[in-house]
Amino acid sequence: MYRIGKEEIEEVTKVIESKSMFKINDALRETEACEASMRALFGVKRALLVTSGYGALASALVGMGIGPGDEVIVPAYTYIATAMAVVAAGAIPVIADINETYTIDPAEIEKKLSPRTRAVIPVHIQGFPCDMDAISAIAEKHGLMILEDACQADGGSYRGRRLGTIGRAGALSFNQFKVISAGEGGALLTNDDTIYERALIYHDASAIAFFGDQLRDVTEPQFCGTEFRTNEIAAAVLRRQLEKLDGILEDLRKNKALLGARLAAKYEIGPSNDIAGDCGTTLPVVFGSEAEARAFSRAAGIDNYLPIDTGKHIYNHWTAILEKRGAFHPLMDPFRFPANAPYVPDYKAETYPRTLDLLSRTVFLLVNPDWTAAQIDDLARNML
Ligand SMILES: Cc1ncc(COP(=O)(O)O)c(C=O)c1O
């Protein structure tokens, strides 16, 4: 989260004064307004505000009809929630290596295909756009659905199309650490009415039938789901955050480009699948060894980290997945479902050396949209 202040405070005050914080109401209808803003900004037919990025991913997978007997390919470098959402739908996550862009390697997707593969989740990690042309071509060739995990890439784009709107569905997150935030929150984006309707029912299965006329145009049958329902305070904050999004991205991109251009004189900067659409939050600096990366990290004088140190984002730290505990009750555990029996990977035995190697000799410099050109000059000089 980069820019939040009086605009959001004013909206929250209005919601509290209205005394209507439930999303279905006759007062400010902030959730409706926020979803409409989202549809317009992202150019999609459907936007569903939920309580988290995980909720958006899980609702999208249920909406796509993913379930037991299906495999879904996810990258080895992503937050564990991506893989857990697949398990929430009853399916099996299959892990694939990343390439030098830190995003899923399209060639590795093809290597992981089986007759049960139904979908792939490209993750635009750190706001780096995935190679969506190559991934879309593979998906088309093999009849796979694409769910974009754009949880770390709110508002970014690939070749002019917003991330999260290229596949069958996309997920955004608005937790504290994202480009825009409401503390927590997420959104599902899609142009597919069926995915939307099922996700709508799943994300709020109990209240959906009883409040307002939410099921008015819905043709999908009601089924039991979960509760990822948002609220008016989060929606009001997000509506104002959405207005700031493109300005934040513009400044992040500008500052990343300035810093990157200076550092490129001495260092290797990681490549991008589309630098114009990259969110600009992170400048990857690549070294020949982990020791060199650590030395640079210590001396950089700017917020940074080695991605290898962010355990939860790397497959070998996903304990619940590696140990195949897909639910507390064994009979509810997709890893034990008869329909999934033919292929449950031995995750612990599988290794992704390219992912580990690249992440261990990379330093991510964290870009600030509010740096001035003079500040960037000083910061760069310190690193050269
Ligand atoms: C790549 C990725 N996917 C999914 C999520 C889940 O988002 P949330 O924390 O909003 O559930 C995150 C959150 O950090 C993420 O980084």
Image: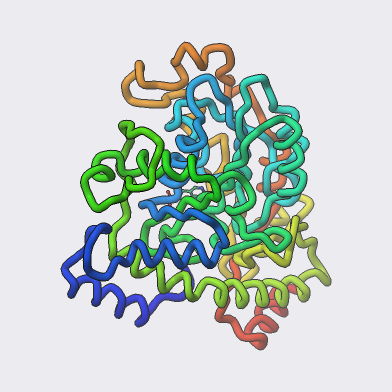
Residue placed most toward the observer, 6 or 328? 6
Residue placed most toward the observer, 308 or 175? 175
Taking the image as shown, residue 315 lies to the left or right of residue 352, namely left
Q: Residue furthest right?
A: 265
Image point (33%, 31%), residue name: 223
Image point (51%, 30%), residue name: 66
- Give coordinates of residue 225: x percent, y percent: 33, 35
- Give coordinates of residue 220: x percent, y percent: 40, 36
Q: Is residue 295 visible?
A: no
- 153 shown above or below 331: below
Image point (40%, 21%), residue name: 333
- Give coordinates of residue 315: x percent, y percent: 57, 36
Residue placed most toward the observer, 238 or 100? 238
- Give coordinates of residue 24: x percent, y percent: 25, 57
Q: Residue furthest bottom?
A: 374
- 240 shown above or below 305: below
Color encoding of the figure: rainbow
Count every numbered label the image shows and give the total: 0
Q: Is residue 215 visible?
A: yes
Taking the image as shown, residue 356 lies to the left or right of residue 63, namely right
- 331 shown above or below 365: above
Which image quarter holds the C terminus?
Answer: bottom right
Image point (47%, 38%), residue name: 63
